[in-house]
Image (cartoon, grey):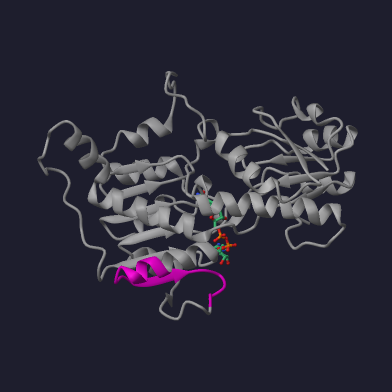
Amino acid sequence: MKILFYDTKSYDRESFEKKQAEYPEIQIEYLKSELTPQTAKLAKGFDAVCAFVSSDVGTQTIKILNQYGVKLVLMRCAGFNNVDVDQAKKCGIKILRVPGYSPEAVAEHAMALALTANRRIHKGYVRVRENDFSLGGMLGFNFYQKTAGIVGTGKIGAAMARICHGFGMKVIAYDKYQNPELDFVTYVTMDELLAQSNLISLHCPLMDETYHLINRESIQKMKDGVILVNTSRGGLVKTEDLIAGIRERKFFAVGLDVYEEEKKNVFEDRSDEIMESSVTARLLSFPNVVITSHQGFFTEEALSAISETTLENAMAYLENRVTENEVT
Ligand code: NAI
């Protein structure tokens, strides 16, 4: 099987090459270009393409892939909101993905953001490098015995709930389905969660019903001095309303691994560019906001699980095996 791997970063290649020796039936060619309707034709002669969260696997791309004989799209990620699944079905192209590669990777990053933002580690790091050992503006608060509100207690939310529990926090949660494994969690309504939490961490998927879940109205329902962390998807938070809330001193701190404007930024070095209009820049101007670039998943364990499952998916296709990783 020949796979064309789009949008290759050095760490992707390293992690796939480590595993590939175990799969002699598979050959991979690595491309730096992203998968788009313009680059889809490069897949001529390949059986499959491997794509990621930022790839454009929309209608046009699928049609072109089909025209050039590609019958399999291997998504090396969990999400598939960038894939036209219906068009793929019409063309007989299978879409396989990696549903849950390492929930702890993302949950640990969520807690890292919460702690960094709370204890102003980002400021302390810079200050000490400048021989400034003062503490002004860096007063935080203990998480111990405070309330953590987890929105969405699936794989990642459950891992975050366990971490918060380990910190000695009271853990409350909102989800449409309760997770029976979390016997230390009290399920409450969304309004109760907003009103009671000192730390709110978002772990539900982005769907029509969760789009802009955090907006002016929900922010008003939050406790004053709350910490908000989003490692799920940018669209869960209405950025303009978040900025207004920060200005009104509603938030003690905010930690974001994802945000609405991230698409152009994610995994790109834009340090030489002049940002013309940017909510990212506005968010970064606040001393109590910490932003990372969609790196929640980025641990050795997660990358290793991603490459292994993607190659296993390719083998399942090759051997005509049914897999629950198929997007239908
Ligand atoms: P999951 O499917 O295991 O859990 C999602 C949970 O959200 C489920 O329990 C579901 O019932 C709940 N949910 C659905 N609608 C809801 C609503 N309206 N309100 C509250 N809860 C609702 O998914 P998992 O693996 O825990 O991932 C969660 C999210 O994390 C993903 O959707 C993805 O957007 C994000 N993610 C971020 C990464 C990063 O690098 N920052 C990496 C991987 C995932």
Which residue occupies 12% across, 35% down? 132
Q: Is residue 253 above or below residue 9?
A: below
* Front position in the image: 102 or 94: 102
Instruction: Estimate the x, y position of residue 291 in percent, counting from the top left.
Output: 38, 41
Is residue 208 visible in the rendered structure shown here? yes
Question: Is residue 19 highlighted in magenta?
Answer: no
| Quadrant that contains the N terminus | top right
Which residue occupies 51% across, 64% down? 152
Which residue occupies 62% across, 51% down? 306
Instruction: Estimate the x, y position of residue 191 in percent, counting from the top left.
Output: 41, 66
Instruction: Estimate the x, y position of residue 62 in percent, counting from the top left.
Output: 81, 38
Quadrant for ligand 1 reads: bottom right
Q: Quadrant of residue 82?
A: top right
Magenta segment: 162-179
| Quadrant that contains the C terminus | bottom right
Please identify the residue farthest to the left as the structure is shown: 134
Is residue 252 visible in the rendered structure shown here? no
> Quick check: 209 left or right of 166?
right
